[in-house]
Image (tube, rainbow, N blue to C red):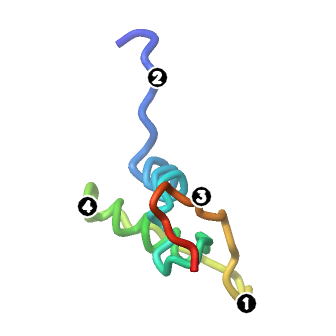
Amino acid sequence: AAGAEPSPSVFTGAVVDGLTTGEADRDGDGWVGLTELVGYVTDRVHRVTPNQTPQMWTFGSQGELLIARRISLVGDCVA
């Protein structure tokens, strides 16, 4: 439709969803690391397009790169 907002790609949609919902924080530590985000995005992309496999190259980096802090949701309990 004319004037409609374009939809994001499957990959971009998965990145945005994982960060905005906090679902990419797979270990529940309150932070979304790059490895967690890539795993989340890969799973989401494979559900829609099984032949597309996102890749991650870290070029010799060490440790986890923290991408975002998860926003606590109502009902989340911080120990």
| Residue 66, percent from left and from top | 68, 73
Q: Is residue 3 above or below residue 46?
A: above
Q: Earlier in the sequence, mark 4 or mark 1?
A: 4
Q: CA distance from mark 1 to mark 2?
A: 39 Å
**Three-letter residue code for mark 3:** Ile
From the image, which quarter does the N terminus lie in?
Answer: top left
Q: CA distance from mark 4 to mark 2?
A: 24 Å
Q: Residues within 10 Å of mark 1 (few under 14, many from 20)?
A: few
Foreground label between 1 and 3: 3
Q: CA distance from mark 3 to mark 4?
A: 26 Å
**Three-letter residue code for mark 1:** Gln
**Three-letter residue code for mark 2:** Glu
Q: Which residue is mark 4?
A: 47
Task: Indicate the secondary structure of the residue bearing disc 2.
Answer: loop
Q: Earlier in the sequence, mark 1 or mark 3?
A: 1
Q: Which residue is mark 1?
A: 62
- Can you name the residue that lies furthest to the right here? 61
Q: Residues within 10 Å of mark 2 (few under 14, many from 20)?
A: few
Task: Tell me if label 3 and label 2 are in contact, CB under 8 Å.
Answer: no
Q: Residues within 10 Å of mark 3 (few under 14, many from 20)?
A: few
| Residue 12, percent from left and from top | 49, 49
| Residue 8, percent from left and from top | 45, 39
Q: Is residue 67 above or below residue 33?
A: above
Residue 5 - label: 2
Task: Indicate the secondary structure of the residue bearing disc 1.
Answer: loop
Residue drawn at (57%, 73%) of the image: 78
Residue 71 - label: 3
How many numbered badges does the structure rendering display? 4
Residue drawn at (45%, 60%) of the image: 75
Relative to 40, is 66 on the left or the right? right
